[in-house]
């Protein structure tokens, strides 16, 4: 008789979900599923709103990455306006985005995952948390707090406040950057470099301790996707979308992001509120692909900044082709923080960053718009349709966590097969399943929008649905 194990809730992620693991008659893992137990409703209740409200409305999807949503939304609205965004406004959007990448990646690496990385996956769960990290590795924990603060200060200095700033608007941004704010942000960069350099050295020094996790954390062939600029370099705001296969070969020429529906489709499973996008020509579920930090470093030809390029070369040297294990998302996040600091310095030293020409004004001239950016967790797509009055008639959002849904599910299965034996769930297996999920840094609030908040749990079930064992964390 087969059994099913459930993990509910998953801890140290943003949002709520559960995992079920099914065992076959011999007690071996036969299946695993990642259930997102929250309901998405944003697309529907945005209908009827004026399109120019959307960048501010969609910021309320998430308190961690509101900037990503506002920029993607504003890009969709730029297309509806049919205007060219002033170059200084584009640079300011990029500067703001540097802040959101730094603060979000710092939160993921230091606050959510560092307790496992520093203390070990088998450490006592009473100590394996941010408080335990502060006790055992106070300098590391304080570096994480300070780096996240730098990211938030970038957002605040550009947009006026750190959360839901409502500064990015259709056609550009609301206000130019004051000179004193520019000077303050420049003063933050040296400390940011010091923190990220010593964190990279520390992280690379412990990789040999986690060979088992590297081997099992979604370490399998998939497609990879990300944005690249005209030179093939890492890109977060503009550029084209690139798909690479597991051998490092381009699937086709880089395509314009507003054509995403020609290449991507979405599938809905009855057991999760989170949609499963897939690469159309390969079908579901064979069209599995990954987005996010490691995927972006896989698909680009370089980062385009000197220090990040050096780290990127080391990252690419981990494997002969694309880096397959999603454990290396942690490494890629640190490289992207370094890249964001370098890009921030470049932008702030550009005299045009202080220009007052930061917005183009128009009414709606088109009836449809698509905005695509890289959010910290991966590709973020906003697609709107409007009527003649500029009211939203239809909206679709494909959030980064959704792009990775198929890979997360397959990764859970890989980890479960390695660490679960019999019909009991152990702390060792529990935390590694959660650790695999944390390596993707899913934002379930972004991807589904909760109407209720269950805890995360793992259950083992028999064929008739009887719960044989459970663990709640």
Image: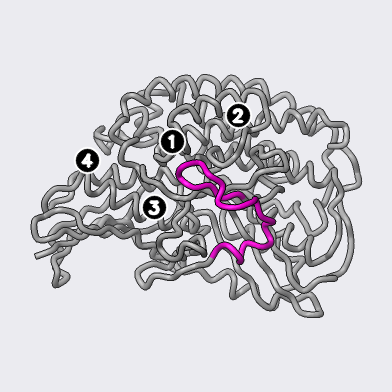
Badge 3 is on which residue? 408
Q: Where is residue 303 in the image (x, y as percent from the top left)?
A: 63, 33
Q: Please provide percent x and percent y for residue 368.
A: 74, 71
| Residue 353 lies in quadrant | top right
Which residue in the structure is indicated by mark 4? 428
Q: In this view, does 314 lie above or below 376?
A: above
Helix, strand or loop at disc 1? helix
- State the image quarter where residue 362 is shown: bottom right
Disc 2 from disc 3: Cα separation: 26 Å
Whether pointer 3 and pointer 1 mark residues with C-beta atoms closer than 8 Å, the reply is: no
Q: Is residue 252 covered in magenta?
A: yes
- Disc 1/disc 2 C-alpha distance (Å): 16 Å
User: In 3D space, how far apart are the residues under numbered discs 1 and 4 (Cα atoms)?
Assistant: 20 Å
SS at badge 2: helix
Identify the mark at residue 328; answer none if there is no mark.
1
Q: What stretch is highlighted in magenta?
A: 242-264
């Amino acid at each position: 008789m087969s059994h099913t194990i459930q993990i509910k809730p998953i801890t140290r992620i943003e949002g709520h979900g559960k995992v079920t693991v099914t065992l076959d008659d011999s007690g071996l893992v036969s299946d695993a599923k990642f259930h997102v137990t929250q309901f998405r409703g944003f697309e529907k209740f945005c209908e009827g709103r004026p399109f120019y409200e959307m960048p501010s409305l969609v910021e309320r999807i998430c308190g961690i990455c509101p900037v990503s949503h506002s920029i993607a939304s504003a890009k969709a609205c730029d297309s509806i306006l049919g205007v060219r965004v002033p170059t200084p406004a584009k640079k300011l959007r990029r500067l703001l985005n540097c802040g959101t990448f730094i603060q979000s990646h710092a939160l993921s690496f230091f606050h959510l995952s560092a307790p496992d990385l520093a203390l070990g996956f088998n450490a006592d769960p009473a100590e394996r948390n941010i408080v335990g990290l502060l006790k055992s590795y106070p300098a590391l924990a304080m570096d994480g707090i300070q780096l996240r603060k730098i990211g938030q200060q970038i957002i605040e200095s550009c947009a006026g406040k750190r959360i839901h700033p409502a500064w990015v608007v259709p056609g550009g941004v609301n206000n130019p950057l004051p000179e004193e704010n520019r000077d303050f942000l420049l003063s933050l960069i040296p400390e940011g470099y010091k923190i990220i350099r010593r964190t990279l050295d520390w992280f690379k020094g412990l990789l040999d301790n986690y060979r088992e996790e590297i081997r099992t954390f979604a370490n399998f062939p998939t497609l990879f996707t990300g944005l690249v600029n005209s030179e093939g370099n890492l890109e977060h705001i503009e550029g084209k979308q690139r798909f690479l296969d597991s051998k490092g070969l381009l699937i086709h020429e880089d395509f314009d992001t507003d054509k995403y529906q020609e290449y991507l489709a979405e599938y809905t499973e009855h057991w999760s509120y989170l949609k499963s996008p897939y690469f159309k020509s390969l079908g579901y579920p064979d069209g599995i692909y990954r987005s996010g930090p490691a995927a972006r470093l896989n698909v680009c030809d370089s980062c385009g900044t000197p220090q990040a390029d050096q780290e990127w070369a080391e990252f690419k040297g981990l494997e002969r082709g694309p880096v397959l294990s999603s454990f290396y998302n942690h490494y890629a996040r640190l490289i992207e923080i370094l890249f964001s600091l370098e890009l921030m310095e470049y932008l702030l030293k550009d005299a045009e960053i202080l220009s007052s020409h930061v917005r183009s004004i128009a009414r709606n001239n088109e009836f449809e718009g698509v905005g695509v950016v890289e959010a910290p967790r991966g590709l973020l797509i906003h697609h709107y349709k409007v009527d003649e009055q500029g009211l939203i008639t239809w909206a679709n959002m494909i959030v980064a966590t959704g792009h990775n849904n198929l890979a997360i599910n397959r990764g859970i299965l890989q980890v479960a097969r390695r660490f679960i034996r019999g019909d009991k769930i152990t702390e060792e297996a529990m935390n590694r399943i959660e650790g695999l999920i944390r390596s993707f840094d899913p934002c379930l609030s972004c991807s589904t929008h909760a109407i209720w908040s269950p805890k995360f749990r793992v259950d083992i079930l028999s064929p008739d649905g009887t719960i044989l064992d459970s663990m709640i964390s």
